[in-house]
Image (cartoon, rainbow, N blue to C red):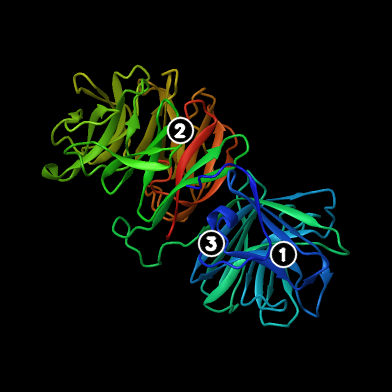
Amino acid sequence: MIKIAAQWVMIMSATFSGLLAHAEATGQFSASQDIGKPSKAGALVYDAGLQQYKITGTAGEVRTNGDVFHFAYTQLTGDFIVRAHLAFTGKNVNAQTILGWNLRTSLDASSASVHALVRSDGLTSLQFRATAGVATEAYPMAIKAADVIQLERRGDTYIMSAAKMGQPFQVTSVSHIRLGEKIYAGLSVSGSSGDQIETGIFSNVRIILPAAKDFLPYKDYIGSNLEIMDMVTKNRRIVFRSPDSIQAPNWTQDGKTLIYNSKGLLFNFDITSGKSTELETGFANNNNNDHVLSWSGKLIGISHHVAEEKNHSTIYTLPISGSKEPTRITAINAGHSYLHGFSPDDKSMIFTGERNGFYDIFSVDIATGKETQLTHTEALDDGSEFSPDGKYIYFNSDRTGMMQLWRMHADGSHQQQLTFDSYNNWFPHVSPDGKKIVFLSYMNDIDSGQHPFYRHVYLREMPFDGGEPEVIAYVYGGQGTINVPSWSPDGSQIAFVSNTRL
C-alpha cells in the first residue's frame, strides 16, 4: 500500500530501475523522458493518493519516420497486459493531441514500436513500426473517442482492446512484430504542432504479468492485488499486493477492515495501516473463498473442507473476532456446501449444496441445522445472496445455457431471469440500499459451469430488477475476484481482487 497523502510529485526524465522502484514518485514506472525533439520538455506527475498519472508533452522536430512524445515507461519481458483509463485535459487540447500506450525496442525516436492510441478528435487506432526507421502503419478502430485502452503482448502478437467506459471492449491486433524479448512499455503524450503543452490524465493504470500458458488450475497460482473502487468516479486503488493468491474480500460493518482468504486461512486487512493479520479459525484451516459476514456484523460464516468427509466443503460460523472452535452448521457427510449469504435476520444461511449429484440452492436454519431446498434443476445454481429487505434471493444459473443472473422470492418461488446476454455472469451482490447489483462477467469462451482463475473479465452493474448492465471495471482475474458480498457498508465503494505475477 502506498502510504503518503494525496499530492502531486513531479519527476523530470529521471532514471530509476525496477517495475516498482521509487513507487512514491513514479507509481508503476521506472522513469520518464522525452522521445525525439519536442519543442518543450514534457513531464510525469504522479498522484499517490488517487494512483493517477498526469503526463505533459508537446510537438516538435520530427525526423523522417520518427516519434515525438513524453514517455513514462518501465522495461518488461515476455507476455504482459497493460491497461489504463485516459482523459484529455487542459486549455490547449487540440485535434492532434495523442494519448496511449507505447511499446518500443529502444528509446530512439525511430525505434520499432507498437502504439495503442486515442487522438483528441476521437480517432482510436493501433499503430506499429515493424522495423526501426520505416513508416508507421495504422489499424483504425470503429470505436470513437475510447477512454479505456488495453494492449496485450502474446509472443509477437499485439492485441489492442478499446472501449468507452461502461461498454465492452472492441478488439484489433497485429502479428509478427518482433520488438525483442525485453522492451520499453509505457504511457505517452504528444501534441500536434508548435509549443503548446498537451496533458493527459491516466487512471486505473495496470501492468499485468499473466499466468503462464501451462499453469495448472488450483495448483499453480500467481500474485494478487487487493483493490478498492469508488463507485461514483470508478477510480481504483491497489491497497495491498501479495505474491500469493488472496481471494474474495468481505467488508466489515465498521468499514475499517477487509477479510480475505489465502492458503486455506482467513486474514483481516486493516485499510488504514495496510497490514494483514490472521483471523483465528482453529481447526478450520482449509477454507475456500465462500465466507460471508452476518448482517449484524457479529459473525462470519466460513466454508471449510473437512478431510475426513471426502474433503467436502462444510459450513461453520464463528465470532467476527475469531475462534479456535467454529460452530458447525451443515450436517455430517451431507455433501459439498458452499456458503453465500445470511438472511437479513441472521437466523438462516443460503448456500450452494451438492445433494444427490446436483448443485442447487438451499437454506439452512442456523439453530436447528434443518435444510430447505430452494431450487430444483439439473443445471448449476450458485452465488445466492439476499436483498437487504429479505424479499428476494439473487443467484446465478446456467439452466438456459449461458450462466445468467436470476432472482426468486425468499421461499424459492417466482424464479425470474435477469440477464440475457452472451456473457457468463456470476455472483450478484446487492448494494446496501438494495437498488443495484454488481457482478462478475466472463467471456463466452468458457464452460458455463466454470469460473476459472486468470481471465479477462468485467465487473458489471445493473438495477436490482434487471436492465442493461454497465461495465464498471476491466479486470484480469476471475475466481476469487468478487465471490462474496464486497460493498462497503455505506455503498460508496466495492473491494475486489485482480491478479498479476509479482
Query: Relative to 398, is 434 above or below?
Result: above
Where disc 1 sits, the SS reads strand
Where disc 3 sits, the SS reads strand
Q: Position of residue 211 (x, y in %)?
A: 41, 62
Label 2 crowd (10 A; few <14 / some 14-19 / many >=20): many
Q: Residue at x 45, y 62 (%)?
A: 210
The tag earlier along the polypeptide, 3 or 1, is: 1
Quarter that holds the C terminus: bottom left
Where disc 2 sits, the SS reads strand
The tag earlier along the polypeptide, 1 or 2, is: 1
Q: Which one is nearer the viewer's eye here, 241 or 261?
A: 241
Q: Which residue is mark 3?
A: 81
Q: Which one is nearer the viewer's eye here, 418 or 43?
A: 43
Q: Position of residue 296 (x, y in %)?
A: 36, 20
Q: How many marks?
A: 3
Instruction: Tell me if I can see residue 156 in this picture.
Output: no
Q: Which residue is mark 2?
A: 429
Name the disc covering residue 70, or none.
1
Amino acid type at circle 3 is Ile
Query: Relative to 387, is 502 above or below?
Result: below
- Single out the residue that lies furthest toward the right: 194
